[in-house]
Image (cartoon, rainbow, N blue to C red):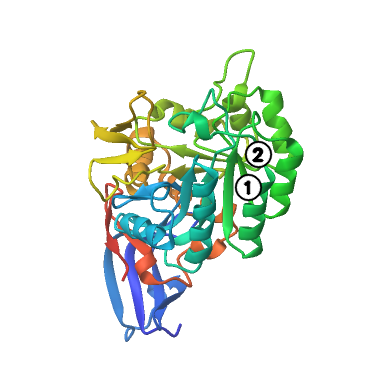
Amino acid sequence: MTAELWLCPDRLFDGDTLRGGLALGLQDGRTTKLVPTSHLPATATRRVLKGTLVPGYLDLQVNGGGDVLLNTTPSAQGIAAIAAAHRRFGTVGILATLITDTPEVLALGVEAASAAKGQPGFLGIHIEGPHLSIARRGAHRAAFIRPMDDTTIAHVTRLRAADIAVMITVAPESVQPGQVAELARTGAIVSIGHSDATSEATRALLDAGATCFTHLFNAMSPMLNRAPGVTGTCINSCAYAGIICDGIHVADEMVGLAIRARPVPDHMFLVSDAMSTVGGSDHFRLYGDEIRLVNGRLVNAEGSLAGAHVTMAESLARLIRVVGIEPAQALRMTSTVPAALLGRPDMAGLTGRDPADLLMLGADWTVTGTAA
């Protein structure tokens, strides 16, 4: 039980369940192991922490933050600024997300991800488009949407060869199953989204190697009595699925319904889909158009939602307090599940961590500080 300090919270979340009566060792700036508080010797140095100790949040869909948008600042410095903005709110790791844009901007985004490898908070890149459906494009510019091509496959292959995590959102309308299989073989996470496809076309991509869905319910064909669409196919599948829980993108009742309806546990995770207004000002420019934050909504000139103004911390609190999801399950949706999807078990628990990457939550599930 060697440790220079023992962190003793009221309770903690170990990546699976909420537990009380445990202490977390700290040695040489890293957490070591969990032991019952009752087993600590009387001479042990303790730091009593009020609240619940949890792993920091992982967000796999972050377009921007701190007045920086990846599409308009596709650089390692831009990624660092976005990650820093979200860290202020408890998110310790992000997939920096590049939405549909020109081939030149996509290439710059890939270069930025390559240069950002190893930066604090950078988990990889989420390429959301341009290989989407025009009908379900949302705020993505129609002129830039195009079929999957060898250039994008080469970008993904290069990033994966450098051991950089990649999630790529595609629609059946713009990609062939063989191309999905090729992307999946690189180790990239192929996610289905922004699609008006049938259930049959969606299942074809799952069979080819897609393992995830992008922001369930949003920008996808709905679930109807005789046509499951992308939405119903996702809910019935064993794939992973991200979901936005801000009370705007998806009704709270539908968030809860989807979580309860999944056939396998722990395959739903929270995403923010955050734009540059998180930790920044109330407006930004996308594709040359101004997007403003009005009553919590980010809307473009066409009236489409243009990303979200929400943090993972706010999403978790809403998921527990409003949607009614059991706290341990909700916490798994912020760290354990995204870590599993990325193949990063080291980001899912409390041990072997920098205490600055561990959060303290109050009774209302809001962040009160870190364990540092």
Give residue 372's position: percent from left, percent from top. Answer: 31, 71
Residue sitting at the far top: 226
Q: Is residue 180 left or right of residue 18?
A: right
Circle number at residue 148: 2
Label 1: how many residues lie within 10 Å, few (<14), some (14-19) or many (20+)? many
37 or 2, nearer to the observer = 2
Q: Quadrant of residue 320?
A: top left
Q: Tell me where residue 254 sits by quadrant.
A: top left
Outermost residue toward the front? 104
As displayed, is residue 265 above or below residue 304? below
Which of 259 and 230 lies nearest the eye of the viewer?
Answer: 230
Q: Residue at position x 32%, y 65% from top? A: 9
Q: What is the quadrant of residue 231 in the picture? A: top right
- The total number of labels drawn is 2
Question: How far is disc 2 from disc 1 in space, using C-alphas?
Answer: 7 Å
The percent coordinates of residue 246 (x first, y second) are 35, 36
Above or below — where is 143 with respect to 16?
above
Residue found 32% across the figure and 86% down from its top:
43
Front residue of 241 and 204: 204
Residue assigned mark 1: 152
Q: Are marks 2 and 1 in contact (CB under 8 Å)?
A: yes
Residue 303: percent from left, percent from top = 35, 23
User: The residue under label 2 is which amino acid type?
Assistant: Met
Amino acid type for the residue under numbered disc 1: Thr
